[in-house]
Image (spheres, rainbow, N blue to C red):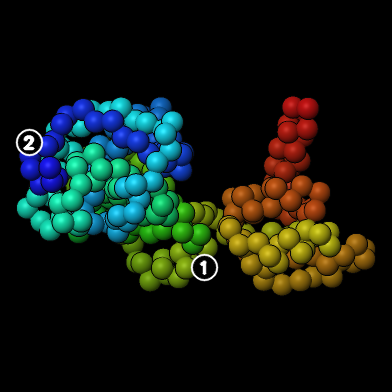
Amino acid sequence: MAIYDPTNLNEHINLNITHLAQKVLDSDRLIFGTIQGKGLSFGTLVNTIISSYDNDFPLTESLIKKKDYQSYIKMRLSRTAIDALIDCSETEYPFGGKYTVTQYIKCMIESYARTSFLEREKLVLKKTVIEPIENAIYRGKVIKINFAGNDVEISPYKIVPSKEGTFQYLIGTVNGEWKSYRLSRIKLLKTKGKAILPATDMVDEILSEFGATFFGEPIIDIKIRFTAKGLLRYEYSVIHRPVHTRIESDAKGDGDIYVFHCSEKQALYFFFSYANDVEILEPLSLRQRFIDMYRRGYEQY
């Protein structure tokens, strides 16, 4: 039977998926389940993907035949997922009605697993987070969210991806201060009164330079000394990489000092894994954070 025949929609399905798809679903259900304090079930995530899919990414027909015989998902289709599958009959079915519902769902899940995380996030959060936020932005409304256990009222400005193309962030103001919140950690509560945004002239420039991950963090001068190995690593790194603004000579002759104009948070994210290949010189607050964190790590062993 073709997928567009409603009689072919069995509420209970048994999906045979590849190990790759299994791993991606396992990872995503944990990431997207953090707002509830626990991971989503496979069934809940798959139902969300089916319900939200609207040609968000291309389906690859050859993936229908890919099998790993020990990877199975036994699940029950939700009413919204069934409705979405029935609605598919009213549009052009991508493979001419050659496959069963289960095969079509398998193709969707396998194709989903082979898209970037950013595209998967856009799909999974589309109905519950992204579209309500975009609607609030369009209507100029404040939204109340829960982020990391705290309720926050924010005047939303835009949703932007990180510079690295990983997560998406909500950018807006809280009590007149610009903030960023990762979408996958947001639980949308409700829309409130009229949003008030200050001038946004410099916001896009700041986002372009520092990215959404560190947006709203105080920007300061950070001074660092590299070893030869650390400097080489810095030159070839990309993720969360700050760019130095100048190089100063060390009066004691201990090597050049690189000065970065960024936030402590960005410096911590980027340089922490360098261990003894960098020395944080300034500010002292950041230097002490590195000392304390390295010490606690050492004490584990």
- Residue placed under numbered mark 1 in the picture: 209
Nearer mark to the viewer, of 2 and 1: 2
Q: Nearer the viewer, residue 120 or 134?
A: 120
Helix, strand or loop under label 2? helix
Q: Is residue 146 above or below residue 250?
A: above
User: What is the x, y in percent for residue 52?
Assistant: 23, 46
Residue 293, by quadrant, is: top right
Helix, strand or loop under label 1? helix
User: What is the x, y in percent for residue 106?
Assistant: 30, 43
Disc 1 crowd, CA 10 A, few/some/many (<14, 14-19, 20+)? few
- Residue placed under numbered mark 2 in the picture: 7
Q: Earlier in the sequence, mark 2 or mark 1?
A: 2
Q: Nearer the viewer, residue 186 or 236?
A: 236
Q: Residue at x 52, y 68 (%)?
A: 209
User: What is the x, y in percent for residue 196?
Assistant: 27, 56
Whole-angstrom CA distance, mark 2 to mark 1, is 54 Å
> At label 2, which amino acid type do we have?
Thr
Q: Quadrant of the N terminus?
A: top left
Q: Nearer the viewer, residue 279 or 2?
A: 2
Is residue 83 shown left or right of residue 99? left
> At label 1, which amino acid type do we have?
Glu
